[in-house]
Image (cartoon, grey):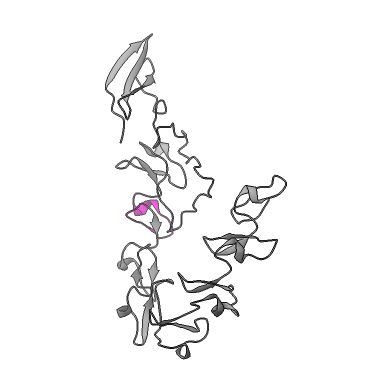
Amino acid sequence: MRARLSSFLVIGGLFVALVPRCGGDTATVDGGVDGSINPNDGAIGNDGSNPPSDGSTPPSDGSTPSDGSTTTDAAGPSCTSDQNCAQPTPYCDTQDDQCVQCLSDTNCGNGRHCSTNHTCVQCTSDSQCGGNTPYCDPVGACVQCLTQTNCPQNQTCDTQDGYRCVNTCTTNQQCNGMTPVCNTQDGYCVQCLASTDCTNSPTGHVCNTTTDHCVECLQNSDCTTAQRPKCNTNDNFCVQCLQNSDCPNNQTCSAQGVCI
């Protein structure tokens, strides 16, 4: 919520505004002799602190900034205009006083669209999809199916793995190739239901039972080489580091999980 100017003073030829803060206190905003107000003076962030004037987001937990993918939180620092914002959230949503990735489709390139949570995505409705992926899924990607009725006979929609049409099954004998195991609960073939199903898998020897995929790791103990002892649980790959403290000799951890 924006601060509202409640009273004014002229002190030593300077224009001074008293701005109410949460809890009833006031903050002064100095202006020039012509009565103009410096928008950076007294600006209040979400936690009552002064946000950076360049619109960048101050780090809160040392995590790596998002790259703007569809699964990214589109909210940036607080703002009153685009001048308070910067990449990757260069636009000010003045309804929520928050820097966001987009306000309309014109803010998104490469044929992407602005979603209701102000993120640039592939689609926001089925009409923006076509060909072999005619449906728009909940995160804004064009996919093959959303429900079983979108798939041919003897197939169903795998909503855990990219909304794909997959063969239905009741036993493992009906499955083969990269999906040799029958998930009898959901009625379709998957890559794994347990890590024992991943023994010969080229993608990893641990079963992610959320996606029924064979992956390299779910936790650090799954990473058994000294060169890559940490598990990046975002993509289930073993990496050299997750944070700077994992690196020797004052090296830093890159976004790719390598000490440099």
Membership of 111 in magenta stretch: yes
Q: Is residue 9 left or right of residue 175?
A: left
Q: Residue 104's x, y, as percent?
A: 34, 51
Residue drawn at x 44%, y 88% as measured from the top left:
171
Q: Residue 199's x, y, as percent?
A: 60, 79
Q: Residue furthest right?
A: 249
Q: Judge whether 248 appears above or below 12 on screen.
A: below
Quadrant hosting residue 98 = top left
Residue drawn at x 37%, y 14% as measured from the top left:
33
Q: Residue 196's x, y, as percent?
A: 56, 78
Membership of 56 in magenta stretch: no
Quadrant hosting residue 10 = top left
Please tell me which residue lies in front, 189 or 166. Answer: 189
Q: Residue 152's x, y, as percent?
A: 34, 84
Magenta stretch bounds: 102-118
Q: Residue furthest bottom?
A: 173
Most prominent secondary structure in the magenta stretch? Answer: loop
Residue drawn at x 51%, y 76% as measured from the top left:
194
Q: Residue furthest left?
A: 6
Quarter in which the N terminus is drawn: top left
Q: Judge whether 229 appears above or below 177 on screen.
A: above
Q: Is residue 178 left or right of residue 146?
A: right
